[in-house]
Amino acid sequence: MSDRPIVSPDVTIRDVAEAAGVSISLVSFVLNARRGPSGEYLCSASQKTAERIVETAERLGYHRNKAATSLRTGRSDTIGVIVSDISNTCFGQICRKIEKLANDAGYLTIIASTDDRKENFRQLVDKFLYSGVDGFIVAPCHGVEDSIAKILKRRLPVVLFDRDLPGVEGVGRVLLDNEKAGRCAVRILCSQGRKHIGLVRYETDIPTIIARENGCREEAEKNGISFTSAILARETMRRDIVSVLHNAREEGIDAMIFPSNAITVDGLSAINELGFSIPEDLAVVGFDQEDRSEMFNPWFSFVNQPTKLVAEYSFRMLLGAIKGDGQLETKIINPLYTLGSKIKK
Amino acid sequence: MSDRPIVSPDVTIRDVAEAAGVSISLVSFVLNARRGPSGEYLCSASQKTAERIVETAERLGYHRNKAATSLRTGRSDTIGVIVSDISNTCFGQICRKIEKLANDAGYLTIIASTDDRKENFRQLVDKFLYSGVDGFIVAPCHGVEDSIAKILKRRLPVVLFDRDLPGVEGVGRVLLDNEKAGRCAVRILCSQGRKHIGLVRYETDIPTIIARENGCREEAEKNGISFTSAILARETMRRDIVSVLHNAREEGIDAMIFPSNAITVDGLSAINELGFSIPEDLAVVGFDQEDRSEMFNPWFSFVNQPTKLVAEYSFRMLLGAIKGDGQLETKIINPLYTLGSKIKK
DNA sequence: AAAATCCTGTAAAACGTTTTAGAAATAAAA
DNA sequence: TTTTATTTCTAAAACGTTTTACAGGATTTT
């Protein structure tokens, strides 16, 4: 039924050259020329021929063959984005915005998810590398310094976001101020009159989570409020968190902080399972969750990354590095929070 | 600071050929050879040289240059996925799964969002086309038949999902049985003892929504239950839906159906705004929303596409069409529903 | 008037593959 | 042994660009 696909673009630069009665070199020069202030083509062609060439190209419906360009120049006008899970709304939003910015800048975006597993991360970096992306924006997993080094060895720019890889040099960073995010969470609860704050997390050395916890503790001390944290095994967290919450309440804890997306999901589920009434029984601050409070239960508060900002900073930084202007630097951004309604209607 | 990126892969097929003492043709043949049942290389090289070549390639860390391959063959081992919004969890999940399947099959995935606007859809199709994707999986916007035709003209396979473009021939389809989904929604509400069901939607001729409404009406009639639907202007839906819900309740409606993702978002927000108590005041069935009931308010029910299945069918169908085996057909799938808890704790 | 400079343009190589058409070496058939 | 077939391998073209190096004519400078 289906013959071989028509793979080669119907009209090549050669066709344009013939139709315009010039050499293919000139076509290439004109089509890649920068434009002067009044729209002139800044290349060795005369304005008249330049215009004729452009007009012919348009008339013929010419489009540059990407593979050929990429082979010749080494550029692919494609950037690679790696996150842990694109279906996590927070990442979804960031990717969406990056893709839009990239598109506007003439770049294609390839996105992949790692499920937070090193092996996947490595495999994807390799794949992106061999397919010739011009740069990377990645939310790294723990322990993928080697993969990043591999990218850098090819002199390709990398921007890290969401998570840091401390000690890695030569990369851009767009990171949440996690200490501040922790302080923010505690301040929300203080403002709601809470006095005994608990935090649950799993055992980890992920700096993001540790920093958030530190921020919480600091702010609690500053406000003279009790702060206790429970540390669970990662594998059994989903189960154990139920009893932690149960006990916490018995012990007079009146507010709970879940310092990451995964913990928030498990924590909120546990609360539903326990049938706690929010915010009477417990005030809650979750992290890294899309704000759905307008749609769902409006009594949770959340501390999030400002996804648009993360996307904008990351992409601009990467683009700058690709183009050669612009520096790879470390950008620390402020947390965004959404307050759960204080009063239940 | 940063010199030009090292774009050309450090080691080319030529290096492998030299190191192995054979011609580059032979290297190419071996590296592209199919493997026989006992692992032999099915090509004109002797097994001994074949093994030597493979071993050399590995030792040197050779990786095929994608741009060159793509230029030569016209294949890019890349598929294009177009949805309305990747940060919509439903699409996020589908994309995630497609990407995983594609990755396992050796394909790269480029994903883009249209915001449900024709112009964007067209622009993205063009872009993907010129960048040489091998096939498309798209959730089309209304009225993009011309873009699809453009793809088909290049003999590239297309699989439609989520929304249909009636009348378009030569494409694969993976679609929800929307009538059944409508019936499903009504059955959920019946089983919860509701007698007066309302539906809100905006003015549209999107077949998806119409079919759902028809399914609802049908099932309501069959069960002898009252069914009324309110049709709003799309632009002002977000605002108008509040008064619709308010009036509905006055008129004794005890259950509400929101037959699309957008309507569900606006509808649930309105419910929160009105301070309705669910399910006492109103039972609710939403569509196309990720099931977050375990985390948030567990009293909503949802009818969804089975995202994994959609992804699997779509990708397999596309891959079949790309490879030449396998047909592009129409696959109608059953809705998935999650019941909100019937009793509020 | 000759030399130098500028303007407009081109030829050809290169990027790294795949693949066609055929060559050389070996084995089988006559 | 000679011919024929088979196995193993290679040369070279092609894919569609970009870019270097340079050519020829027009213009300016000396």
Image (tube, coloured by chain):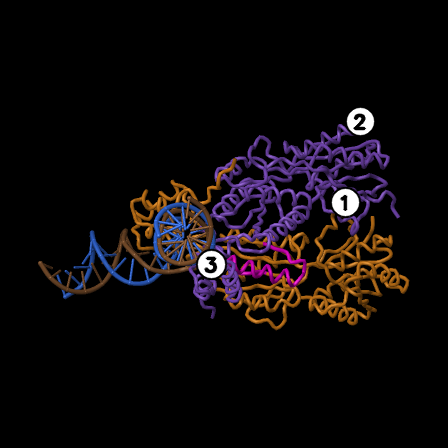
Chain colours: A purple, B orange, C blue, D brown
Q: Residue type at mark 2: give it.
A: Lys
Same chain shared by disc 2 and disc 3: yes
**Residue A239 falls in which quadrant of the image?**
top right
In this figure, which residue is indicated by the disc labeled 2?
Answer: A222
- Lateral position of residue A150 relative to residue B58, left or right: right
In this view, A70 is above or below B228: above
The answer to which image quadrant residue A267 occupies is top right
Q: Position of residue B284 (x, y in %)?
A: 80, 58
Residue B123 inside the magenta-drawn segment: yes
**x%, y% of residue B267?**
79, 58
Residue type highlighted by circle 1: Glu
Q: Name the side, left or right, on which B341 lies relative to B36.
A: right
Residues at discs 2 and 1 in contact (Cβ within 8 Å): no
The span picked out in magenta is B111-137
Name the residue beneath numbered marker 3: A27
| CA neighbours of label 1 inside 10 A, class few (<14), some (14 to 19), many (20+) | some
In this view, the residue in front, B109 or A17, is A17
Q: Which chain does tag 3 point to?
A: A
Furthest-right residue in this view = B250
Q: Is residue A160 above or below residue B201?
A: above
In three-dimensional space, the C-alpha distance between marks 2 and 1, rounded to whole angstroms, equals 33 Å
Point out the tag, 1 or 3, that comes first from the N-terminus: 3
Residue at horizontal 79 percent and vertical 29 percent from the top: A220
Q: Are marks 1 and 3 on the same chain?
A: yes
Q: Subunit of mark 1?
A: A
**Residue at 29% in and 51% down:** B46
Total marks shown come to: 3
Depth-wise, is mark 2 or mark 1 nearer the camera? 2
Is residue B41 at least partly visible in the picture? no
Residue A172 lies within the magenta run: no
Identify residue for label 1: A273
Determine whether the residue tagged by mark 1 lies in a helix, strand or loop.
helix
